[in-house]
Amino acid sequence: MKKIILACFIALPSFLFSQTKLSPELLWKLGRVNAIGISKDKQYIIYSVATPDVDQNKSITKTYRIPVNGGTAEEVNNADTLVYNNHISPDGKWKISDSDVKIMNVYGSDFYPELTKSNAQVYNSLMYRHWDTWEDGKFSHIFLSAVNDTSKKDLMAGQLYDSPQKPFGGDEDYIWNPDGKHVVYVTKQKQGVDYTVSTNTDLFEYNTETGATKNLTEGMMGYDVNPAYSWKGVLAWLSQKRDGYEADKQDLIVYNGKQKINLTEKLDTINVESFKWSDDARSIFFVAPVNGTLQLFGVHADFDSSGTADVTQLTSGDFDVKQIVGQLYNTLVVVREDMNHAAELYLYDLPTKSFTQLTHVNDSMFNTLALCKTQRRFVTTTDKKKMLVWVIFPPNFDSTKKYPTLLYCQGGPQSPLTQFYSFRWNFQLIASNGYIIVAPDRRGMPGFGTKWNEDVSKDWGGQVLKDYLSAIDAVSKEKYVDTSRRGCIGASFGGFSVFALEGMHNHRFKTFIAHDGVFDFRSMYGTTDEMWFENWEKGGAYWDKNNAVAQRSFSQSPSNFVQNWDTPIMIVQGGKDYRVPIEQGQQAFQAAQLKGIKSRFLYLPDENHWVLKAQDAMVWQHEFFKWLDETLK
């Protein structure tokens, strides 16, 4: 009898047992895969896995190699020696590195050495703090040294500029030319107010033999970043045209020392996120958002041919290709994820256009989880445009039942809403707690044309808010949406959207959650760090009464509509967020409290615009669902 029961048990389909629902605890046990590169002998893929340790409030990172054709991964301790290092000169004699150099006096003890206990800070210009760090008088510089010598030469000696760029630049900001005589690095040669109002970074070339430096992108006025050479010596990089517009269309440029070609300029929907040269140096593979996903593209970049761009979309599907690691003959190694699966390494076969999963870091977890169905819908907006809306359903969704439903508002404002897998705004986790999620690719999303992407700028309180309401109204017509239990959530621009919709939703929503959202445009203009963003998005300063665009923008501040607030709201604020500073969350919470609205303030003093510490993230997740339980279920 026991044998018969066991046989029946084994014969049952495995999906019947895959019913565990994702929880915050399980989410923070997932390994986070990061690609390092292909080994020099092209036999292995090198990658790391960061696994959160909630008890220790940190992540433990290990490095692995796996055969290029798949197999068993093994831990390695010498990853840096296994992959090609573009910071070592081609002849192997020289290396470049970056280090901070103290140049500017900031602290009280800098000015008054005898006052050793003073923690005063003195500033004479803007950019005195950036992202989550106060200016300390140190600047990142590029250094040249012999491989076996500790002495180093500062290639930017005395300059009050950074390379790598702060706050997010890394060692991708400087590289060797294959000729072994030139170093190219990214910097913005501006200071103070000029720095805060400009996005004009440039590529500079340093001649190691003569010490001369020249600007390779002079006259190119926007961001110029991510330089990468082919083995033939052709330089490629990402470039934006307009100074001060950080969300401008990002194109792919190639330069052979004489001629520059913009490979994607004429393609309105292409906004390049990252790229990699092909092995034969005749093409470039790149990633760009399209139709609510991130896909892989290829483009000819051979100066020996016609020099015309011939862009081909190589992949399609409901997933994101996050990164191109490199090429192995007819195969690309990429990082891929979707709303139900965290990032893993995949092989993409170019001839057959097929994927093969290479790493399986989180398979054992995902094989036990009930997955969430994602659906594409196209909603007609109030100005008669077709808008993509992602709808994410709870596991084991039953269309005959009614579900509480959340409108998700994406940040940016011009960042793509795709098949991403977030460790904070995790759609699988939210849906697994019993919620339907409505996630519109509203005005301001790249991948749907330049105009669609730009229509949010200088009009935050306009059509974009109507787009949100169009999305929730359309999906709410479905019988499975409980219209008496709808909420609205979001962070950054999404947090602004929450504050704005609180003042105009006409009783659609029963609850709101805003994280690091912009509440008051005037105080935001007076305290944020990157003024190029504010000037572009608002159209100018609030005190310029002759600037009709700016005056309209500032009139759209959510703080101007608090008189209409009447719905419970939870407000989350990072203490080290200098992009959307603390007074934004404080003002919103204080307004809600003084109006007698049920409200909660979750303050994270050690977090910036994100939530990076494991235990803070767990508090965030539990407070998030606790608030929804209190106000929506």
Image: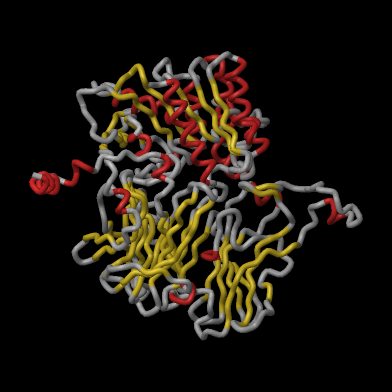
Where is the C terminus found, in terms of image quarters? top left
Q: Is residue 307 visible?
A: no
Give residue 100's position: percent from left, percent from top.
Answer: 68, 64
Q: Is residue 274 found left or right of 366 in the rendered image? A: right
Residue closest to the far front = 1
Of 177 and 527, the residue lying toward us: 527
Colouring convention used in this rendered image of the protein: secondary structure
Q: Is residue 98 found left or right of 490 in the rendered image? A: right
Residue placed at 19% from the left, 44% from the top?
15
Give residue 439's position: percent from left, percent from top.
Answer: 36, 34
Give residue 585's position: percent from left, percent from top.
Answer: 59, 30
Residue placed at 42% from the left, 74% from the top?
230
Residue closest to the far right = 114
Q: Is residue 163 found left or right of 447 in the rendered image? A: right
Of 526 and 348, the residue lying toward us: 348
- Say which quarter of the image contains residue 451: top left
Residue placed at 76% from the left, 62% from the top?
103
- Say which quarter of the image contains residue 545: top right
Give residue 430's position: percent from left, percent from top.
Answer: 37, 35
Q: Is residue 148 visible?
A: yes
Of 210 and 288, the residue lying toward us: 288
Where is the N terminus found, in terms of image quarters? top left
Determine whether 115 is above or below 576 in the image. below
Determine whether 559 is above or below 145 in the image. above
Of 575 and 99, the residue lying toward us: 575
Determine whether 30 is above or below 623 in the image. below
The number of numbered discs placed on residues in the rendered structure image is 0
